[in-house]
Amino acid sequence: MALATHTDTQPSQPQGGSRSHLENYKDMLLAICITDAYPDDAEIAKDAGSSVSALDGWTVYDLDHASAAFRSLVRGYLRRDYSVWLKAHGLPSGRYGVLKCLDMYHSQALELQARRMVIEPQVREASLSP
């Protein structure tokens, strides 16, 4: 009996169109945060930047105010200093950019910002056809 692998059952197209505007806004900020966390890595910048562009197409938000708001939120999380906590828990020092971005992604601050900026937060765009 053959078992299906994860890749055998997954769609071969992006799923952003099936997520709500609110979910895509938050996903977009996660991608922006990861890009900003690693500014010297061209491959990450290109990949995350492409993802931001795709997510932007599936998200309707207040363009006049969102850019400054999400840049401020991202910068605030990336400036966090986790060194004392890391040292106290015996973990190696490091940038921990992805961890900071994940903390932002799951934060109440992002949830509140997304609810302020996103227009029709529960609306889902039609999935793109292959």
Image (spheres, rainbow, N blue to C red):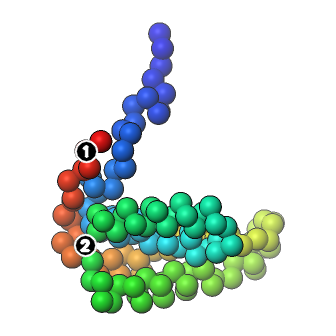
Residue 49 lies, with reference to residue 2, above or below; the image says below
Badge 2 amino acid: Val
Q: Say which residue appears at 44% left-offset and 72% top-offset.
A: 29
Residue 3 lies, with reference to residue 58, above or below; the image says above
Q: Position of residue 105 (x, y in %)?
A: 47, 69
Query: Which numbered disc, 1 or 2, marks the residue closer to the eye?
Result: 1
Q: Are marks 1 and 2 in contact (CB under 8 Å)?
A: no
Q: Position of residue 84 (x, y in %)?
A: 75, 80
Residue 85 visible from this viewpoint: no
Judge left or right: residue 76 versus residue 92: left
- Label 1, label 2: how many angstroms apart (C-alpha)? 20 Å
Judge left or right: residue 22 versus residue 122: right
Q: Say which residue appears at 51% left-offset and 64% top-offset.
A: 48
Q: Position of residue 27 (x, y in %)?
A: 41, 65
Q: Say which residue appears at 30% left-offset and 65% top-offset.
A: 57
Task: Pick whichever of labels 1 and 2 is earlier in the sequence.
Answer: 2
Res. 68 mark: none
State the count of labels: 2
Q: Secondary structure at mark 2?
A: loop
Q: Which residue is mark 2?
A: 60
Q: Which residue is mark 1?
A: 129
Badge 1 amino acid: Ser
